[in-house]
Image (spheres, grey):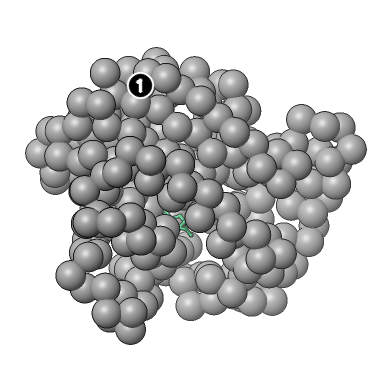
């Protein structure tokens, strides 16, 4: 279902459209995130890294790294080396500039790689993170199988994703915000109305927290847990590999 929610048209593959869309909105991506999340995006990413830090990873893969906000936060974990992958060259260009500016080249490397078909060998990573990425995948199960393959046994995956609040009142407010305000703000900052309409639709069509937890279990992950934040508008899922 989520693979059918696409930004621009029904003819081209979702993947092609997604990489073009993030190329288009890359320039103002960080600032738009700050505006639409009222500054909470940084706090949510820090929470994600806090969840992963207890496992003391030495090699972490950040899938759908975008402008490397999570990858950079992951370098705060002692002796952790990070690889960030994405399919948007423009997002990766911005990520690269940030990493050079912060002198983190020895800790973070970047590559244009598709989550659904990664070049890494089996059992390569202690930990894997995906922030606001899973709902953009064309084939969610294929990507999760790949995550499982490249993760070491006893490794951990932590996923941060938008979600729809359970509470009726907050759900209504959230729907008004996502359907009306989010596309307007996105249009003003990026000039791409369709992109922010898509980002809103993809959130509203993404499986709910229990369904997504079940999808993780069906793909072999164990100890699946989730925690909701900010009235349920984002959730952090964690799981392991036997
Ligand atoms: C909403 S951004 C999230 C970026 C970053 N993780 C963050 O926290 O801001 C989603 C990113 O997922 C990337 N993406 C979508 N599908 C992908 C795939 N199949 N493989 C790798 N990256 C993908 C997009 O190019 C985009 O940069």
Q: Secondary structure at mark 1?
A: loop
Depth check: give the residue in front, 223 or 197: 223
Query: Residue 34's x, y, as percent?
Result: 63, 68
Q: Residue at point 33% right, 33% down? A: 156
Q: Is residue 223 left or right of residue 39?
A: left
Residue that mark 1 sits on: 221
Residue positioned most to the left: 121
Query: Could you say where residue 1 lies in the image, as x and y percent from the top left?
Result: 53, 30
Measuring 46% from the left and 47% from the top, which residue is drawn there?
50
Count the numbered circles shown: 1
Image coordinates of residue 51 in percent, x first then y, are 45, 41
Residue that extends furthest to the right in the rendered view of this protein: 169
Q: Which corner quadrant of the figure contains ligand 1?
A: bottom left
User: Within 8 Å: ligand 1 and the Cβ of disc 1?
Assistant: no
- Which residue: 59% across, 39% down? 235
**Residue 228, percent across and down?**
64, 36
The residue carrying pointer 1 sits among few (fewer than 14), some (14 to 19) or many (20 or more) residues within 10 Å by Cα, namely many
Residue 90, quarter of picture: bottom left
Residue 109 position (above or below residue 128): below
> From what the image shows, is residue 147 above or below residue 241?
below
Residue 235 in sight from this viewpoint: yes
Quadrant of the drawing holding the C terminus: top left
Residue 84 drawn above or below residue 186: above
Q: Viewer-proximal residue, 25 or 170?
A: 170
Q: In this view of the protein, can residue 66 be seen by the observer?
A: no
Residue 88 placement: quadrant: bottom left
Q: Residue shown at 41%/33% (left/top)?
A: 140
């Amino acid at each position: 279902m989520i693979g059918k929610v696409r930004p621009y048209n029904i003819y081209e593959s979702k993947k092609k459209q997604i990489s073009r869309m993030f190329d288009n909105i890359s320039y103002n991506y960080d600032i738009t995130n700050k505006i639409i999340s009222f500054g909470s995006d940084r706090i949510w990413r820090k929470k994600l890294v806090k969840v992963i830090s207890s496992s003391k990873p030495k090699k972490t893969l950040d899938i759908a790294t975008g402008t490397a906000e999570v990858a950079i936060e992951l370098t705060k974990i002692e002796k952790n080396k990070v690889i960030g992958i994405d399919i948007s060259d423009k997002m990766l260009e911005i990520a690269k500039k940030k990493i050079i500016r912060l002198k983190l080249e020895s800790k973070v490397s970047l590559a244009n790689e598709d989550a659904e078909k990664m070049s890494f060998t089996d059992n390569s990573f202690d930990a894997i993170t995906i922030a606001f990425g899973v709902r953009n995948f064309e084939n969610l199960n294929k990507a999760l199988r790949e995550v499982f393959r490249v993760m070491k046994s006893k490794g951990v995956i932590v996923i941060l994703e938008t979600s729809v609040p359970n509470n009726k009142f907050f759900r209504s407010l959230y729907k008004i915000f996502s359907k009306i305000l989010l596309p307007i703000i996105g249009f003003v900052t990026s000039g791409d109305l369709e992109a922010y309409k898509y980002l809103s639709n993809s959130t509203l069509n993404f499986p709910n927290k229990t369904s997504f937890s079940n999808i993780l279990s069906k793909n072999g992950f164990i100890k699946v847990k989730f925690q909701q934040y900010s009235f349920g508008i984002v959730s952090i899922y964690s799981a392991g590999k036997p």
